[in-house]
Structure formats: C-alpha cells, structure tokens
Amino acid sequence: MPKRVTETIKTVKTVTTKKPGKSSAKSSAKVSSELSQKVIENLVDLQKIETNLAERFDKLSDQISRLLALFEMAARDFGKQPLPAGMEKDREFMDKINMLLEQNRTLAKGLMLMEERLAQAAEQRPAPAPVYRPQLPPQQPQQAPPYFKPAQAGRPLPRF
C-alpha cells in the first residue's frame, strides 16, 4: 500500500511540473480530473487501512483479555496448590522477619512514649537546687622524688 501512495505523489509532481506556456484548457481539465481521481483513490485506500487497523485493534484487545483471564486462572490455581518444601522454609523465614518487624515497631513506639514522658517531666520539674560541695584547702605541690630527673632540653629521647 505505501508504494501506491509514493507513486501517486510522484505522479502529482510530474503533472504539476509542466511548463505553463504549453498547457491548454483541455490538458488543465484533464490534469485536475486525474488529480481528483488520485485523491479519491488515496482516500479510499486510507479508509481501507483504517478499517484494517480497527479490526487488528479489536483482535489485540480480545487477545489481551484472554491473556488476563489466563493469568487470573494461574493465580487461583497457584493459590490452591500446597507449597513445596523449599517454599515452606521461605514462608517460615518471612514470618520470622515479619514478627521481628512488628517487635521493632512496638519497641520504637515504647521508646517514643518514654521520650515524651521524660520531656514532659523535665518541663514540669523545677530547676535543680545547687549541690553544696565544701571547698578543700589548696594543696601544696609535691616535690619530685630524688631519683627523678627532668629531661634535658637539648638531649633527644631514645628510640626503641
């Protein structure tokens, strides 16, 4: 079908590229009737193509509906059949993980409640009174033992 449309465009180009000085009334009427005929043929071809596409879309929607029904049947059958041994272990593992997640949520809620209560208690509590601490008399610096000699400034430290 696309060839026919291309041929028509070529025909229209050749018809319209004639030099204006040599055309007569008969040839221009003939050209316009040929052009009208080609336009009508193209419109008919286009309508056939549109009809064909509409039919294909209907078939496609029917096939999609059947595929969806097949998936629904497979899901129902899969739900009815017992799980294999490996799948049962996976289910147990997932149950344990779900239980841990639930415990985690419970602990998080408890911590949030404790934080809120501590914040409320801190707001309601008066400022703490200063604690009395007796001052100790100042101590005199102790003298270094006689065997302790401070390092000399110019001497480097030994390396091990």
Image (cartoon, rainbow, N blue to C red):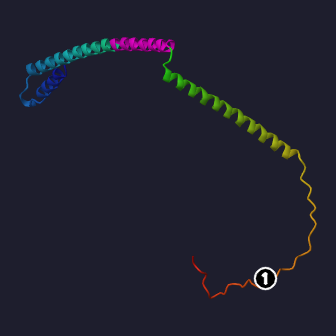
Left or right: 82, with 144 as reference point: left
Residue 61 in the figure: left or right of residue 45: right
Instruction: From the viewer's side, name the closer residue of 70 and 98.
Output: 98
Residue 76 in percent (x, y) is at 49, 12
Instruction: State the image coordinates of residue 106 (x, y, percent, origin top left).
Output: 71, 32
Q: Residue at x 37, y 11 (%)?
A: 62
Q: Is residue 115 above or below residue 142?
A: above
Q: Nearer the viewer, residue 136 or 30?
A: 136
Q: Residue at x 8, y 21 (%)?
A: 27
Question: Which residue is located at x 32 percent, y 13 percent?
Answer: 54
Q: Relative to 28, say whether 124 is above or below.
A: below
| Labels in figure, total | 1
Magenta stretch holds residue 66: yes
Quadrant placement of the C terminus: bottom right
Residue 127: image location, x then y, percent: 89, 52
149, above or below 85, in the image: below
Element type where label 1 sits in the image: loop
Extent of the magenta region: 58-81
Q: Residue furthest front?
A: 147
Quarter of the N terminus within the rendering: top left
Q: Give the dominant element type of the magenta stretch: helix, strand or loop.
A: helix
Q: Which residue is at 77% across, 85% downward? A: 146
Based on the picture, tell me whether residue 80 belongs to the magenta stretch. Answer: yes
Quarter assignment of residue 20: top left
**Left or right of 67: which side holds 144?**
right
Q: In the rendered structure, which amino acid carries the disc numbered 1?
A: Pro
Q: Observer-nearest residue: 143 or 101?
A: 143
Left or right side of 149 for 55: left
Residue occupied by mark 1 = 145
